[in-house]
Every structure is written in C-alpha cells, then in structure tokens.
C-alpha cells in the first residue's frame, strides 16, 4: 500500500501581500509605509514582561508573546510583531507612570549613553517564525528640567518607552550608533531585507548596484 503523498507546498506569493503588523505603534506603521509594504494592524492583548537588567531578553520575550497570540488568528498571512526596550544605567525603562516619572527619565539621560533594543518575530504565510534583535545607541547632551517638562507637555510622549520619540527629541542627542529607524521602532533595512529574502511581492530583488 502506497503512503499518501504530502500536500503540495504553496508559495507565499499565493497569499495576501498585506502584512499583519502586531503593533498599534504609529512609528512602526510609518516605517512599513516608507517601505511601501501594505499592512494592517492587529493588537495582541498579552501581558508584557520586564527583565530589569536584560533588554534583549525582555524585548525578545514580548515580541514572541505577541506573535504567539496572533498567529492562530492569521496562519495564512505575513505577520510581524515587535517590542522595543530602552536600556540605561543598567536597567530597562518602560513607559513612565506619569509626567513626573517622564521628567525623571529624561533628566537621567544627560551626558549618558542609552541602548535601544528592538526584537522582532516575522513569518511568511504558513511559514516558520524567525526572530531578529537589533541594538542601537544614543549619547545625550545635558537636559534641563524646564526643557524636559516643556518637551513632555508639547509632545505627550508619556505613552512611550523612555518617555520620548526620537523624531521630536533629536535635538537632545549628540550621537547615534546603529540604525536610526530602529530607535523609531523598526529597523528599516533589516525589515526590508527579510521581506525581500522571503519573496514578498512589495520587495523586489536587490539590483547589482543595491547589493554593492
């Protein structure tokens, strides 16, 4: 008796090109929009963990939790989940509890170097999830209390890890190491390379000039 044949594999190109972005972050939305990758948002309602002294473990665990919560809902879709953690002075920073907490965070950045870690989990339709972790660094100039309070009141960033958005706080940064877009929430080049390598129709193969 012959064994049954395995089901034929289906190319990812046969499925919808619209990526499910497991994040409501406007900054992450902007990165995908800049890459011309069509996407829609689906938020995973899962508790986030915080490993106080390990930003990579924190971000990786949270990105995977979001992915595991969303994958059963979207098995036949491109899926990307992510988590970004700010690390300074030997500890991870989450979102400030209020404006005063945000002010304390911003003041602690004066003349200090900060790491921003983004972890992602990506998968093609019916594909195996793949993890990526990217680290960028920032060095800040002196930040005064009046400046910190004015910034938070003008830009309302107490809903973001570290209490700032790099686009609106760039003037306080003396130097950046690594990916700027990673600090915004998604490393543009890593995302583009991954989707291109996996045959997403919005990411054409690199030309010889681009490869150089």
Image (cartoon, grey):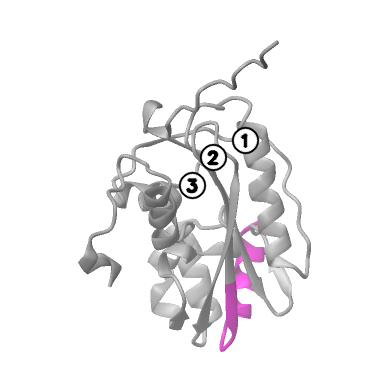
Q: Nearer the viewer, residue 47 or 121?
A: 121
Q: Are marks 3 and 1 in contact (CB under 8 Å)?
A: no
| Residue in the picture at 49% in, 57% down | 185
Report the span colored magenta: 97-115
Q: How many marks?
A: 3
Q: Secondary structure at mark 1?
A: loop
| Residue in the picture at 38% in, 54% down | 192
Give the CA distance from mark 2 to mark 3.
Answer: 9 Å
Q: Quadrant of the N terminus?
A: top right
Q: Nearer the viewer, residue 66 or 92?
A: 66
Between tags 2 and 3, which lies in front?
A: 2
Q: Give residue 113's position: percent from left, percent from top.
A: 58, 83
Tell me where residue 106 sits by quadrant: bottom right
Q: Give residue 97's position: percent from left, percent from top.
A: 68, 56
Give the CA distance from mark 3 to mark 1.
Answer: 12 Å
How crowded pointer 3 is (Cα within 10 Å; few <14, some 14-19, many 20+) is rated as some
Q: Are marks 2 and 1 in contact (CB under 8 Å)?
A: yes
The residue tagged 3 is 25
The residue tagged 2 is 22
| Residue in the picture at 45% in, 61% down | 187
The residue tagged 1 is 44
Question: Sequence-wise, which precedes: disc 3 or disc 1?
Answer: 3
Q: Secondary structure at mark 2?
A: loop
Q: Give residue 12's position: percent from left, percent from top.
A: 43, 33
Residue 173 lies left or right of residue 123; in this view the side is left
């Amino acid at each position: 008796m012959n064994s049954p044949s395995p089901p034929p594999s289906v190319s990812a190109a046969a499925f919808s090109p619209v990526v499910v972005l497991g994040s409501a972050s406007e900054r992450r939305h902007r990165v995908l929009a800049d890459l011309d990758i069509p996407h829609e948002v689906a938020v995973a309602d899962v508790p986030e963990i915080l490993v106080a002294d390990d930003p990579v473990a924190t971000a990786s665990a949270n990105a995977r939790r979001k992915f595991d919560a969303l994958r059963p809902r979207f098995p036949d879709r491109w899926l990307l989940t992510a988590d970004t953690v700010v690390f300074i002075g030997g500890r991870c920073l989450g979102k400030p509890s209020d404006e005063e907490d945000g002010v304390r965070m911003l003041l602690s950045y004066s003349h200090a170097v900060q790491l921003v870690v983004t972890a992602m989990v990506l998968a093609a339709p019916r594909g195996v999830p793949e993890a990526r972790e990217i680290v960028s660094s920032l060095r800040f100039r002196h930040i005064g209390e009046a400046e910190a309070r004015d910034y938070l009141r003008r830009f309302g960033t107490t809903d973001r890890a570290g209490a700032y958005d790099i686009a609106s706080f760039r003037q306080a940064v003396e130097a950046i190491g690594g990916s700027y877009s990673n600090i915004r929430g998604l490393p543009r080049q890593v995302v583009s390379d991954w989707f291109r390598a996996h045959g997403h129709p919005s990411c054409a193969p690199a030309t010889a000039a681009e490869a150089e």
